[in-house]
């Protein structure tokens, strides 16, 4: 048996390249280097094998390596296995003592910081930093995390730099290009912050494109940031998280396998908590959910316990939009009327408090009601007393969904834009603050963030300020017909007549 550390002596890829085909039971000096490779990347432990002998434990480790790298799992050291081991690759292990890493470890907060320390002389004007920033942006588009660049003096969560191959964190000597680490709780490189993203700057040449005898920074950074977020190496060729990469090559877009892996970590699943038959409008109010259904009934339920059903509390004839405000429910109906009711007692009926001509979206905010109408106008009214009419306060061109949040109004329009306005005074116009591609279903405000459902059945979240912060895809929203927030959670009714709940944020 051998107890030598796989990192104590540098891997000799030249020895591996000169090792002939070795069958199970055969002994060859080159097999010792193959065993060191298998130990380095986690396929076997030091107590399992006899040095330089392709014994049963070494053969089993080779089969695991071959299976993960798309090779025929022969368990022998053959030409295909030799070629695979000679490929440039990430220094992070594929397995831990022969067991695949779990992908259940993730960051427990939404905002992460990163900083650059050392650069590379291969690239001018710190273009390598811009390439890493682009890689962060690619992950930020599919994961509910916000990455902010700071300085090394600001105690960053992630520290990025170009190092010698003999990096004391994790050796990159040989064909290893770079290394990172997994999040706190499942780290294998460091036990403290910052987590490293280190590139080998002594054995490899770096570039900002596909270039002969060089490696594209963004391609490698995209892979290493995947580890930082909690992803292990993929067994799917063509995925960003595939362990090896070629010179003169770029891969700057996530594959389905990458997106599915990151979703398995960071997507908060909806919980099915009951039925929602025929819902046409929904509102959260006073810790309860209220919905109007297509059979013209009004229902209420406590959303907390999944086994608590809806209570029928009256009619909701022809409701097209509904909002909660000041402890009351308000609805606009398809006969262009506005109604109000106290939702508590089931036998208290709606009170007609005015007209609601052509309402397409409605929101309560700062003690007032706001509505967008199909003639592209925005109106406001104080809901009490009933004889106070709407005030026209501007346009609402093409509004399909609207929500109040943090004292502001937000609307998605049918030209796929997102707009914000301070509703007071009336002469303040909307500010365009980004896109709202396909938000034709629902939008809601919760815990200081906006949530939107798009017509491709996805759920998105964004911080509404500043305007240049984009939406983050945070999960699916299959068949949503109505959505609102109450008690710190989102609730939605779907077109298969079910009710779902999920916590906000992560």
Image (cartoon, grey):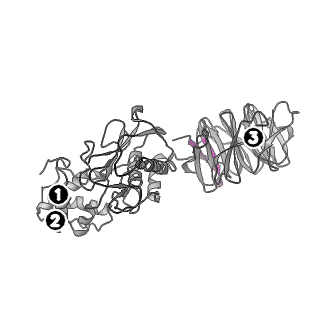
The structure residue drawn at horizontal position 33% and vertical position 42%, both measured from the top left corner, is 187
What kind of element bears circle 2?
A: loop
Give the residue pinned by disc 2.
19
Q: Is residue 504 magenta?
A: yes
Q: Give how far across and how far down residue 82 sits, in percent.
A: 23, 65
Left or right for 44, reference 255: left
- Residue 477 in view of the camera: no
Of the numbered discs 1 and 2, the one sitting upstream in the chain is 2
Q: Nearer the viewer, mark 1 or mark 3?
A: 3
State how many labels appear. Answer: 3
Identify the residue position indicated by label 3 in the image.
429
Q: Select label 2 or label 3 by which is in front.
A: 3
Q: Residue furthest right?
A: 387
Q: Main secondary structure of the magenta part?
A: strand
- Is 479 displayed left or right of 218 in the figure? right
Report the span colored magenta: 490-506
Bin the neighbour count of mark 2 within 10 Å (Cα to Cα): few under 14, some 14-19, many 20 and up: some
Q: CA distance from mark 1 to mark 3?
A: 70 Å
- Lower sequence index among marks 1 and 3: 1
Q: Please name the residue that numbered disc 1 is placed on.
A: 33
What secondary structure is found at the residue carrying circle 3?
A: loop
Query: Looking at the image, can residue 278 be seen?
Result: yes
- Counting from the top left corner in percent of width and height, residue 172 is at 26, 50
Quarter of the image where one finds residue 406? top right
Q: CA distance from mark 2 to mark 3?
A: 74 Å
User: Closer to the N terminus: mark 2 or mark 3?
Assistant: 2
Confirm or deny contact between disc 2 and disc 3 (CB under 8 A).
no
């Amino acid at each position: 048996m051998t107890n030598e550390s796989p990192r104590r002596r540098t891997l000799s890829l030249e020895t591996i390249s000169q090792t002939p085909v070795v069958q199970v039971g055969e002994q060859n000096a080159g097999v010792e280097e193959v065993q060191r490779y298998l130990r380095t990347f986690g396929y076997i432990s030091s107590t399992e094998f006899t040095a330089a002998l392709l014994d049963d434990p070494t053969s089993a480790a080779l089969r695991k390596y071959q299976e993960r790298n798309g090779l025929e799992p022969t368990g022998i050291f053959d030409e295909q296995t030799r070629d695979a081991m000679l490929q440039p690759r990430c220094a992070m292990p594929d397995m831990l003592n022969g067991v695949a890493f779990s992908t259940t470890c993730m960051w427990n907060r939404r905002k992460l910081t990163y900083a650059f320390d050392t650069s590379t002389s291969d690239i001018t004007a710190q273009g390598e930093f811009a390439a890493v920033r682009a890689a962060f942006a690619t992950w930020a588009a599919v994961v509910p995390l916000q990455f902010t660049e700071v300085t090394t003096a600001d105690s960053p969560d992630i520290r990025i730099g170009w190092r010698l191959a003999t990096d004391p964190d994790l050796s990159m000597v040989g064909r290893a290009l770079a290394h990172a680490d997994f999040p706190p709780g499942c780290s294998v490189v460091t036990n403290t912050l910052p987590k490293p993203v280190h590139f080998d700057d002594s054995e490899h040449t770096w570039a900002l494109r596909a270039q002969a005898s060089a490696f594209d920074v963004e391609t490698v950074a995209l892979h290493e940031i995947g580890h930082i977020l909690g992803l292990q190496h993929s067994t799917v060729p063509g995925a960003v998280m595939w362990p090896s990469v070629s010179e003169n090559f770029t891969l700057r877009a996530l594959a389905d396998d990458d997106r599915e892996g990151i979703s398995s970590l960071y997507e908060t699943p909806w919980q099915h908590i009951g039925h929602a038959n025929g819902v046409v409008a929904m509102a959260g109010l006073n810790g309860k959910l209220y919905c109007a259904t297509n059979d013209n009934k009004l229902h209420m339920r406590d959303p907390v316990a999944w086994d608590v059903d809806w209570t029928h509390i009256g009619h909701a004839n022809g409701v097209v939009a509904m909002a909660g405000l000041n402890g009351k429910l308000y609805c606009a109906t398809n006969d262009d009327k506005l109604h109000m009711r106290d939702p508590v007692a089931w036998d208290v009926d709606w009170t007609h408090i005015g007209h609601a001509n052509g309402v397409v979206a409605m929101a309560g905010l700062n003690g007032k009601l706001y509505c967008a109408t199909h003639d592209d106008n925005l109106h406001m009214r104080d809901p009490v007393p009933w004889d106070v009419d709407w005030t026209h306060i501007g346009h609402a061109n093409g509004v399909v969904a609207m929500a109040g949040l943090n004292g502001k109004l937000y609307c998605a329009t049918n030209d796929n834009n997102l707009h914000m306005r301070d509703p007071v005074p009336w002469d303040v116009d909307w500010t365009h603050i980004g896109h709202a591609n396909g938000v034709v279903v629902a939008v809601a405000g919760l815990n200081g963030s906006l949530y939107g459902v798009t017509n491709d059945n996805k759920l998105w979240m964004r911080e509404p300020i500043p305007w240049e912060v984009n939406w983050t895809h945070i999960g699916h929203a299959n068949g949503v017909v109505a959505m609102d927030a109450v008690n710190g959670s989102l609730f939605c009714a779907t077109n298969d007549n079910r009710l779902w709940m999920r916590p906000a944020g992560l």
